[in-house]
Image: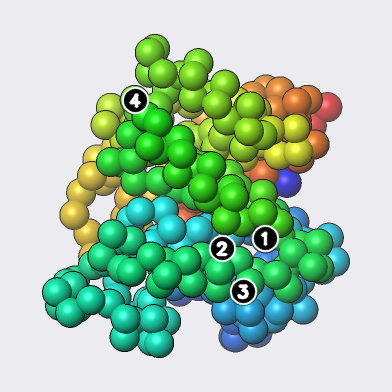
Amino acid sequence: MLVGTASWTDKSLVESGLFYPPEAKTPEDRLRYYASQFPIVEVDSTYYYPPTERNAALWSERSPAEFTFDVKAYSLLTQHPTRPNSIPEDLRAEVPAEHRGKRFLYPSHLPAHVVDEVWERFRDALMPLHSAGKLGAIHFQFPEWFLPGNESRAYILEAVERLPDYQVAVEFRNAAWMNERNAERTLRFLTEHRIPYTSVDMPQGFRSSMPPVAAATAPDLAYVRFHGRNVEQWKGKHETATPRFAYLYTQDELAEWVPRIRGLAGQAREVHVLMNNCYRDYAVVNARQLASLLAEE
């Protein structure tokens, strides 16, 4: 059971001065310190901008041999709106004229060979982590409009096929995937294809709210993410996503998940538990608390 946070570079964490020592002034210093405190991290920057091979090599060099990086899939690959300036410049030049002025791009706006190239570069960029034995899962967080159905299931299998060397894990953000009608089929589909389902703790009462179901659908990995329970801010409009995750779990709230996570550990070789309540030091505080609870006999 590996417990960590969904970023080591979060701006509010760095600026809070509550986690990193004063001498950790550079990204290298902060990664080295973070990796001395936790065994795993989820890289969220790769959702906004695709990773580079150089960055992956540096992450590997700056972390202990047994450290694990889970990596969020790039937004274009998860069918989210993608900022044009995040697409590599040479590929951006191939965006059709009618789409060049758009604020966001989707795969349908791009020629098929450009989308293929984005996939290939994403895969190649992470090979240094994979070669070092430090790459955990590629985490596909799908958008709210990614609905249960044959087309969506086919796309998940396409993602697995395009990343043959890596473990793909999926998180849904539409409650229909796990409602009474679809839950059994969703988990059966993932189990048949040995794809980890991402169990989540998150605000309830929204179309995007997934129930707090702990499910192991792959023998090698179970994946759990904690998004906080900030109901008031979850759908608010903010300049950044940070206020949505401003929630510090209580010890009792974390304890609710201890038997669930231990249950997952009995069904999968590894369980990756990531605190995504990345606001100030909330995630690192809760990660330490949960790791301590899980270590108790």
Quarter of the figure that contains the C terminus: top right
CB of mark 2 within 8 Å of CB of mark 1?
yes
Q: Where is residue 279 in the image (x, y as percent from the top left)?
A: 43, 58
Identify residue type, mark 4: Ala
Mark 3 Cα-neighbour bin, 10 Å: few <14, some 14–19, many ≥20: some
Q: Position of residue 205 (x, y in %)?
A: 28, 27
Asked whether the viewer can see residue 255, the reply is: no
Of pointers 4 and 3, the one earlier in the residue sequence: 3
Q: Residue at x 49, y 42 (%)?
A: 156
Report which quarter residue 231 is drawn in.
top left
Of pointers 4 and 2, the one earlier in the residue sequence: 2
Which residue position is annotated with label 1? Answer: 69
**Camera-side mark, 3 or 2:** 3
Q: Position of residue 13 (x, y in %)?
A: 49, 66
Secondary structure type for disc 1: strand
Which residue position is annotated with label 2? Answer: 43
**Camera-side mark, 4 or 3:** 3
Of pointers 4 and 1, the one earlier in the residue sequence: 1
CB of mark 3 within 8 Å of CB of mark 1?
no
Q: Whole-Å distance between the Cαs marked 3 and 1?
A: 14 Å
Which residue position is annotated with label 4? Answer: 176
Q: Whole-Å distance between the Cαs marked 2 and 1?
A: 7 Å
Identify residue type, mark 2: Val
Of pointers 3 and 1, the one earlier in the residue sequence: 1
**Compared to 45, does 268 lie above or below?**
above
Horizontal side of residue 52 vs 130, given as left or right: left
Identify residue type, mark 3: Ala
CB of mark 4 within 8 Å of CB of mark 3?
no
Secondary structure type for disc 2: strand
**Compared to 17, does 163 lie above or below?**
above
